[in-house]
Image (cartoon, helix red, strand yellow):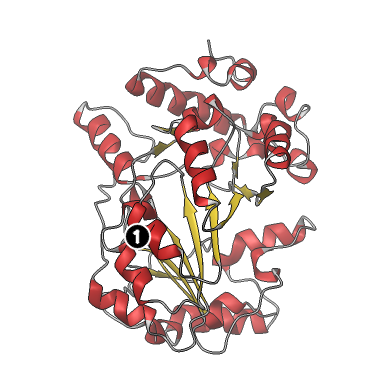
Amino acid sequence: MKCKYLEHQVMIRPDGEFRMCCISKEKTNKENINDMSPEEWLASETPTKAREQLANNQFPEACQKCELMELAGKPSMRQRPREYGPGISHLDIRFGNQCNLRCTMCYPGSSSSLYEEHKELRAKGQESPWGWFDYGLYNWYTDEQGETLARNPNLREVYLTGGEPMMVKGLNKFLGKLDPSVEVRFNTNGTLFNPKVFDELKRFDRVNMNFSIDGIGKTNDYIRWGSDWDTVEYNLNKFREVADVSLGPTVQIMNVLDHDTYIEYAQANDLEIFDNLLMTPDSLHIKNAPQAMKDNIKHFDYWMSQPTSIEKQDEFRKWIGVLDKHRGVNIKDYLPEVAGYYGIS
């Protein structure tokens, strides 16, 4: 077995840490963009050992998500039929964790707004869904780093996410350093319109913008707390002037019952859907839904056949209760079906 991501792509987290890919589960890596080059990272111990294991038909422990997808008979990210190489042809970059939303399934390391909420809960002496780790505010982009990354002679594609990439100071400068032949891909929450970025995107041959929308209307506003559906829909249509726009829902407990509605919206608006099945936290994984709810979930038969954890259902109630109280809302006003299955009043 092989994985093109381990050979021809470099992924960098919001804090600058190198990772094998965006869904890998290795422990914290010491290698950081501030200390070594992308080429040095690919030659380091962690990705080298992973490549050796795959060559021996063994999935590294960190590659659990691809292994599970393949066991379920579904194509994994490793198997996607996309051309990579030679050299480092693809970049998967998070320039920091600046984000204006508090998405329930996210965590403070990827959202500065969740980091602030995490601190607020701890300041009150309350237990936080994200534990007692301090996290931080990250922004490692500099014009010098941008120049180094953009001038890679083999570069074919740059994927930008966050945090929220539209909040990155200097993002338009980075885009300005890229050759127009490079494919630019975004993952955005859709709440922000950056005119400088919009203007830069006009000069590229191909731009793909995936809107991380987890439902239609109030469903998205609740899951991606701080979002406004009308603003998201306006920006989606505006960016279609310079990009191929698609939808990328994080499929989880809170939106899986509305998946048909999501599909109908996408079809009505000629939008492609790229499902991202949430794996963690377990309390939001669709396999751990109450059985009565699982009986009404479509499209995800494999996960519906997996054992349900009552413990994780209790965790869901606990953490939704903590966040709802802190935010001054109630899940039943936004997701009444889900609230009903979980006995939340």
Residue 248's place in the image compared with 226, above or below, is: below
Residue that appears at 30% across and 82% down: 36
Q: What residue would you read off at disc 1? A: 14
Residue 247 visible? The answer is yes
Residue 217's place in the image compared with 246, above or below, is: above
Residue lying farthest top? 345
Residue lying farthest left? 123
Residue that appears at 53% across and 15% down: 332
Residue 27 visible? The answer is no
Figure quadrant of residue 106: top left
Label 1 sits on a secondary structure element that is loop
The quadrant the N terminus occupies is: bottom right
Task: Pinpoint residue 289: horizontal percent, then vertical percent.
Answer: 65, 31
Figure quadrant of residue 286: top right
Q: Is residue 32 left or right of residue 247?
A: left
Task: Pinpoint residue 43: horizontal percent, then vertical percent.
Answer: 44, 88
Residue that appears at 35% across and 72% down: 176
Task: Pinpoint residue 124: horizontal percent, then vertical percent.
Answer: 21, 26
Residue 163's place in the image compared with 324, above or below, is: below
Q: Is residue 59 left or right of residue 167?
A: right
User: Viewer-proximal residue, 188 or 267?
Assistant: 267
Amino acid at pointer 1: Pro
Residue that appears at 55% across and 83% down: 7
Task: Pinpoint residue 128: horizontal percent, then vertical percent.
Answer: 33, 34
Residue neighbourhood size for the residue with mark 1, other residues' Cα within 10 Å, grouped as few (<14), some (14–19), many (≥20): many
